[in-house]
Image: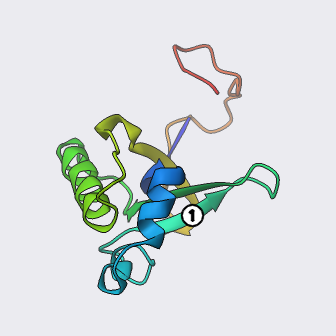
Amino acid sequence: MKLDKTCSLFFATKIDSKLREGLALSKPGDKKYFDGSSEDFLRILEIGDEKDKERWIGKVIKPGPAVTEVDDIQRNILSILRRVAPNARIPQSAVKIFVLQGAHVTAAVIDDEPEGEEVDETGSGPYITY
């Protein structure tokens, strides 16, 4: 097993029709909160192929945030979304955390496997796979 400390995290919620409408109707001055121009605010990412494309809005977070920061990040995302799309009701549980591949900070991979030992990639631990 390897610990990768280089991948950023994406705290986001899926854009549904209500949120899409709210973002489209937002004030011109509020567009800065989700146009991706600042790391302090939100950005929109598309996931999937042309047929099954999903759009998510959220915040890119540097690798390794403290557990105590997760609540603050979630509240920040929801407060920005309430400001720009007040009619969209987004529950706290709608904010998900994803690893953002391709947004590496620096190369720092920690390998806890002894060299030369074979590792069973299928795993046998109590892990959830999707």
User: Eyeballing the image, is 72 above or below 39?
Assistant: above
Residue 22 lies, in percent from the top left, at: 41, 63
Residue 26 lies, in percent from the top left, at: 37, 74
Q: Residue at x 34, y 52 (%)?
A: 64
Q: Quadrant of residue 41?
A: bottom left
Q: Quadrant of residue 82?
A: bottom left
Q: Residue at x 30, y 39 (%)?
A: 92
Q: Nearer the viewer, residue 106 or 111?
A: 106
Q: Is residue 115 visible?
A: yes
User: Eyeballing the image, is 36 above or below 7?
Assistant: below
On-image quarter of the C terminus: top right
Residue 87 lies, in percent from the top left, at: 33, 54
Residue 125 lies, in percent from the top left, at: 55, 15
Q: Residue at x 42, y 72 (%)?
A: 25
User: Eyeballing the image, is 61 above or below 93?
Assistant: below
On-image quarter of the N terminus: top right
Q: Residue at x 50, y 60 (%)?
A: 20
- Which residue type carries mark 1? Leu
User: Eyeballing the image, is 71 above or below 80?
Assistant: above
Q: How many discs mark residues in the rendered view?
A: 1
The colour scheme used to paint the residues is rainbow
Q: Is residue 105 visible?
A: no
Q: Nearer the viewer, residue 84 or 106?
A: 84
Q: Nearer the viewer, residue 40 or 104?
A: 40
Q: Nearer the viewer, residue 42 or 20?
A: 20
Q: Residues within 10 Å of mark 1 (few under 14, many from 20)?
A: some
- The local secondary structure at tag 1 comes to strand
Q: Which residue is mark 1?
A: 45
